[in-house]
Amino acid sequence: MREIMISHTVTGLDVMCRHCGNAETATTTYLKHFRLEGTSKDSVTLRCLCCHTAMSTPLGQLSSLYHHRAS
Ligand SMILES: [Zn+2]
């Protein structure tokens, strides 16, 4: 079960924690209400800073954030 939902938007990503309702629209990898941890070659752990739920996700899911930062 995916505790943290990621959906793509025009400008970045919508991230929402299903556990506590914490949500954020992200345009860079510097999130206010979530944290990216343990970035490896092909996956990253996304942690909710409110309830500390964490979910591992393929790095490709967040690629638009990295691309945005680089451009
Ligand atoms: Zn949460």
Image (tube, helix red, strand yellow):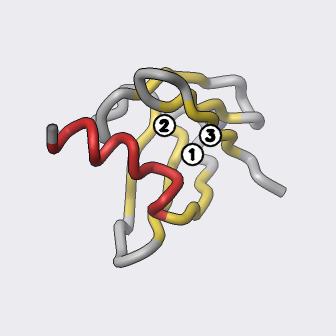
**Disc 3 target residue:** 6
Q: Mark 1 vs mark 3: give the one in front.
A: 3
- Horizontal side of residue 58 vs 11, given as left or right: right
Name which residue lies at 62% across and 40% down: 6
Which image quadrant is residue 42 in?
bottom left
Q: Are marks 3 and 2 in contact (CB under 8 Å)?
A: no
Q: From the viewer's perspective, is residue 6 above or below residue 39? A: above
Secondary element at tag 1: loop
Name which residue lies at 47% across and 70% down: 43
Q: Are marks 1 and 2 in contact (CB under 8 Å)?
A: yes
Label 2 Cα crowd, 10 Å radius (few <14 / some 14-19 / many 20+): some
Q: Are marks 1 and 3 in contact (CB under 8 Å)?
A: no
- Horizontal side of residue 3 vs 55, given as left or right: right
Label 1 lies in ligand 1 vicinity (Cβ under 8 Å): yes
- Horizontal side of residue 68 vs 55, given as left or right: left
**Disc 1 target residue:** 52
Label 2 lies in ligand 1 vicinity (Cβ under 8 Å): yes
Q: Position of residue 10 (x, y in %)?
A: 48, 22
Label 1 – label 2 distance at C-alpha: 5 Å
**Disc 2 target residue:** 49
Label 1 – label 3 distance at C-alpha: 16 Å
Which image quadrant is residue 37 in?
bottom left
Give 24 or 41, whichever is nearer the viewer: 41
